[in-house]
Image (cartoon, rainbow, N blue to C red):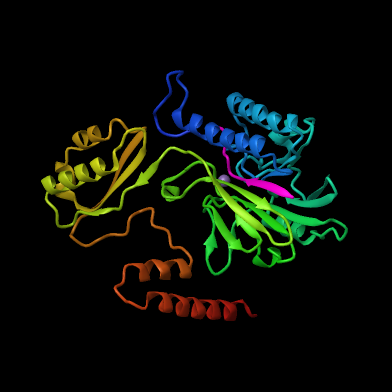
Amino acid sequence: MKVLHLADTHLGYSAYRKVTEEGVNQREIDVYDAFTQCIDYAVKSKPDLVLHAGDLFDSVRPTNRAITVAVQQILRLSKENIPFIVISGNHETPKLKETGNIFSIFEHLDHVYPIHNNHYETVSLKNKDETVMVHAIPQCQSPKEFETNLKKITRGKKADFNVLMAHGAVAGIKEFKMNEFNELFIPVKNLQEDFDYIALGHYHMYTKLQENAFYAGSTEHLSFTEADSQKGCLEIDLGQKLKHRFIPLKTRIMVGAPSLDCSTLRIEQIVQKVKETIQAIDPKDKIIRVCLENVPSHIQRGIDFHQIRDLGKTAVHFEIKSTTIKTGEAALSKDYKMKSLADEFEKFLDIQQYQEKKILFNLGLHYIHKIEEQEKKP
Ligand SMILES: [Mn+2]
C-alpha cells in the first residue's frame, strides 16, 4: 500500500513586501505553488492514500483565496478517488470550540476525511484486498486533553496496516519543536514500533525520527531557521518492510548567509565583505539574509545600509540583521534562545578543533541522557 505523507502547507501564509503582477503577495503564491506540486505528484503517482499531518492552513480564519486553493486542490484528489485524511494543527485550530473549525467545509467532499474535533478518531479504508486503519489525533485544547487522547489509541488487530497521525513536537534526546505558544508535545513512548507508520506534522524540517516515524516537514521555507532545508513530501510503501522516499519540491531558494563577525572590521571592509557575499549568492529571485555580528556601535552608525540594500534589489526579499556591541565585549543577541542540552552541546562541539568530535558527541549524549533519566525519577 502506497501512502503520500505531507504536512505544514500553511496555506494563506504571506511574508515580505514583494507582490506579483496581480498584486498578490509573492510568498503567499509560493506557498500555494508548493502545495499544488504535492497534489500534482499525487495525481500522477496515484497513491492509495494521502495523509496531511496538520497546519493545512496558516491561520484559524484563512482568506477566501487560501480556502479556494485548498478546495480546488483537494477536489483533484477526490475526483481521482484518492482518499485524503487531514488533521488540524496548532495553526488552524481555534482556541475556542465555539469559533468552529474551517475544516468543516471539507466534510461533504467524497474521499476526504477532515479530523478536527479535538479528539482521537480512526478512519478504516480498504484498498484492493488490503485494509488500513488510520489513527488520527488532531490538535487538542490542552496538553492534558492531548495526552488523554493519545492514551486512547488502540491498534486495529484485524487491519493489515495501522498508521498513526499526529501534529506536535517530540522531545527525546534531541528536541523537534517550533517554540510556538500552543504547541503540544508527543511523548516518545507514543511513537511505538508496532505502528506500520507514524506520520507527523508540526516540526518544519524533514526528519526521520525512527524506522517508522517521520516528520514530512513544511512544503515551503517559512522562516530563516529552515533556510537550508530541502522541502518536499514523503512517499511511503507499507509492506513487509517500510520503504520511504523523499519527494523534493521546487521551492524558492532561501539563503541565510553565515554571520560575519564585524568586531575588528572597518566600514569599508564590512561593505566589501557583504558585497562579496551577495555576489556569491546571486540574489535574483531569492530570499536572502545577511547577519552582521558584533558591529561596534560607532561603526554601525557609519554604514551606508541603502547602498548595501541596493546590492540585493533583484531578490524577492533581502534583509540585513545586525547586532552591535558597545564596549568590544560581545553581548548575547536579543533573540538568543537556549535549546536542549544536547543541542547546545552539539553546537559547542561544532566550533571546537578536536579530532574525536564524534566520539565526544556520543559520550556527551550518553551522560546527558543518564542525568536526564535520573532527574525523571521521583
Ligand atoms: Mn506548522
Tell me the residue at 83%/51% (across/down). 131
Q: Nearer the viewer, residue 280 or 135?
A: 280
- Above or below for 134 versus 101: below
Residue 225 in magenta? Answer: no
Tell me the residue at 82%/56% (across/down). 160
Residue farthest toward the top in the current orientation of the protein: 22
Q: Is residue 257 visible?
A: yes
Tell me the residue at 80%/49% (across/down). 121
Q: Nearer the viewer, residue 172 or 7?
A: 7
Residue farthest toward the right in the current orientation of the protein: 158
Chain part drawn in magenta: 1-12
Q: Is residue 43 left or right of residue 290?
A: right
User: Where on the picture, by quarter, is residue 80?
Assistant: top right
Q: How many marks?
A: 0
Q: Is residue 158 left or right of residue 282?
A: right
Quarter placement of the C terminus: bottom right
Q: Nearer the viewer, residue 190 or 377?
A: 190
Tell me the residue at 34%/41% (across/down). 288
User: Where on the picture, by quarter, is residue 327?
Assistant: bottom left
Residue 166's spot in the image, x, y percent?
68, 52
Residue 45's spot in the image, x, y percent?
65, 40
Q: Is residue 32 left or right of residue 337?
A: right
Residue 90's spot in the image, x, y percent?
62, 46
Q: Is residue 184 visible?
A: no
- Above or below for 20 versus 155: above
- Above or below for 6 versus 14: below
Residue 116's spot in the image, x, y percent?
73, 42
Q: Nearer the viewer, residue 355 or 183?
A: 355
Q: Is residue 365 left or right of residue 45?
A: left
